[in-house]
Image (cartoon, grey):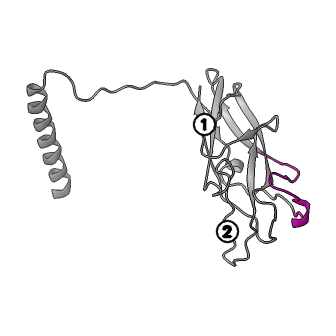
Amino acid sequence: MKLKHYSIAVLTCVIATGLSVQALASSPNLQITGTILSRTCDVASDSQNMDVDMGQFNASSFTSTGATSSATQFNIHLTGCGSKASGAKMVFSGTSDATNPSLLALSDTSGQGGMASGVAIEILDNTQQPIAVNTVTSGHVPLTSGDVMLPFYLRYKSTQNSVTPGNASAVMYFDIQYQ
């Protein structure tokens, strides 16, 4: 009970202090903006923690810088999209590759070392055009009301002329910005 009373007393002091500062200021020092949206979409449970198996590729198949593997599709499943959710922009985030910052760097997710080198992961949209990691997509993904499946692709891309074999795993996150 004392903790609740203490919190209320502190809040009252902050409000009173804020009012006295407001009375001295001739213009507002805090402007609040925002938007109230109609129902957006929920990320389905099968898309909240995904494992994407990219397959196995021979290091010698990456013959020069920029060589790529075949692409592996993954889907982000959205449910319950409202009728006003017409589109979204995506941000795929993670550690950028040191040599090519538009690519997702490999990380030792196994904890056993022996990580591949000279290669990173490229993210592709549904038309298999590259999406730079840690950047808002330039175009928007169209959304319809109800359930929506958003297809994307991943592939390995060499960042050096020579690729060393090993664990080629990474961790990536995604954010959806509704239009």
Mark 1 surroundings within 10 Å by alpha-carbon count, few (fewer than 14), some (14 through 19), many (20 or more): some
Res. 11 image quadrant? top left
Q: Horizontal and vertical percent for residue 107?
A: 66, 65
Q: Nearer the viewer, mark 1 or mark 2?
A: 1
Mark 2 surroundings within 10 Å by alpha-carbon count, few (fewer than 14), some (14 through 19), many (20 or more): few
Image quadrant occupied by the C terminus: top right
Q: Horizontal and vertical percent for residue 13?
A: 11, 42
Residue found 81% across the figure and 59% down from its top: 53
For the record, the magenta segment spans: 56-74
**How would you classify the magenta stretch by its main secondary structure?**
loop
- Left or right: residue 10 versus residue 68 is left
**Residue that label 2 marks:** 109
Residue found 66% across the figure and 22% down from its top: 86
**Residue that label 1 marks:** 136
Image quadrant occupied by the N terminus: bottom left
Going from N to C along the chain, the mark reached first, 1 or 2, is: 2
Q: Which of the labelled discs sits on residue 156, or is there none?
A: none
